[in-house]
Amino acid sequence: MTEYDVIIVGAGPGGSVAAKVAAEAGLKTVFFERGRKPGEKNASGCGLGPRMWRTFPEMMKELTPENVPSMRMAGCVMNHYLDKDLKERAIEMYYPTDSVTYEPAKQFITMNVYRSEFDPWLAKFATDAGAELRASVLIKNLVKNDAGKVIGVQTEKGEKILGKIIIGADGVLSVVSKMSGLNPRWLPNQVTIVPQYDFSADRDKIDKIYGPDGVLADAADACWWGVNFPSAYQVIFGDGFHIGLGSWLGQWTKNPISHINKLVSSKPFQRMMKAIDAKPREVHSHLLPWAAEPIKTYTDNVLLIGDAGGFPCPLEAEGVFPAMETGKLAAETAIKTIADGDTSKQALKLYEDKWKKSSVGVEFEAGESLQTLWRNLFFSTQAEKNNMEWFIPAYIELRGGHYDWSEPHIVRFRQIFKKLRSYSQDVIPFLQKYVLPVMADVMEEDMATLPFLTQMMENLKPKKKK
């Protein structure tokens, strides 16, 4: 029976980073991939945020279009707002703002890559460090000793591999998580299903529209906000793009595909597709954790990272960076506990201490209030109270009403304010119920402003006639 110091189930971004860090420390390390190569079974692509370059500078400086041809920089993000008739009411573009403190983040929002290229590129760092990659191997169970503690893994062919530390990097449907007892099942409000379409497109036309010198300079990320569908994200790559949307399993009232079809068939979306000669290429649908906080992530000899631990961002469920950072922290924990000769759950609590102090842990400090806000605004389109019905017209009125020249400006301002007050019966309760809790979680100082804001909202309500 083969024995290792560290066994990692999964060769995605988190598993590869964990394997690299463990192998560099001299630990005998193996990581398993169920596909023929890392990235083969991943859904389309992703946007890599600037935190990747700060946390993994040596690796990320080697991420270039020569190594990953699909790579495209998103220097800004576009927001599209569609009303109940699927008519586009506004488009906004945002570049990094002045409050950004990390210098590279002033240059771009994300670097967009296809996982089919990114994952094998990343896995090579692990194999170059000495980790053994075993592809086309499906882990079906865990090996336990007489005391019920996990001591290894078992493949679908019955092969048993023993290890001192087993790291679950095997995604939302994690065998390690389930079989170790850490997470027998996800609750409907902890996981999302994401239908996604991938399109090929003409590279020159993409550059003409979205390239550095294009009509919409540097715009390679987009969000589509609507009344008829949950918030959708669009990520543009070197030779194509994908569009996807999701919501919590417990919140769907219609087939998810029907929602994405509404957006894709809308005139604004079709106009964009025509401009870059986009053609359907693939259809994906996958599960992602989308929880207000991670699950229990450690027990005797076992650590969970990335999606397996529920680490995707509570706001938009982005999971690549959390997987990589928790992979690094898990490997560092394995290095210390193996050296100490103690891999019990008491010793492995060090991992939880580490991730709670990391940037991934900070993400969850307002996880519940942020998710509650998101669930009841951009993802309320399936709920009994669809707040997007008032949000989009109110937001457009506030942001764009003053551009109208049909009246003197002061008259227009009065008209705009009157219209905004007509939404106050929806806006004020929403702000009080969902926005103020986020502010209370986020604001570290000047909490005395909250009562002031509450009173100000009350004053904005239309007065009842006597």
Image: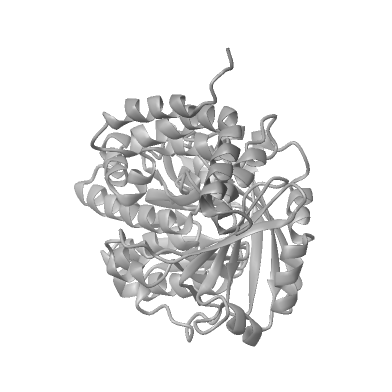
Give the residue at the far top of this rendering: 466
Q: Is residue 436 above or below residue 13?
A: above
Q: Is residue 266 above or below residue 249?
A: below
Name the quadrant containing residue 406.
Answer: bottom right
Q: Is residue 230 visible?
A: yes
Q: Is residue 82 above or below residue 267?
A: above
Residue in the image at 41% along x and 30% along y: 437
Give the residue at the far left of this rendering: 340
Name the quadrant containing residue 175.
Answer: top right
Q: Position of residue 383 (x, y in %)?
A: 68, 33
Front in this rendered view, residue 97 or 159: 97
Name the quadrant containing residue 132.
Answer: bottom left
Residue in the image at 34% along x and 39% along y: 442
Front in this rendered view, residue 151 or 306: 306
Q: Is residue 33 above or below residue 120?
A: above
Q: How is the image coloured?
A: one colour
The mark total stands at: 0
Q: Position of residue 29 (x, y in %)?
A: 38, 62
Q: Is residue 209 left or right of residue 261?
A: left
- Figure quadrant of the C terminus: top right
Front in this rendered view, residue 240 or 140: 240
Front in this rendered view, residue 185 or 321: 321
Q: Position of residue 377 (x, y in %)?
A: 58, 39
Give the residue at the far front of this rendering: 408
Q: Is residue 411 left or right of residue 107?
A: right
Q: Is residue 2 visible?
A: no
Q: Position of residue 200 (x, y in %)?
A: 70, 76
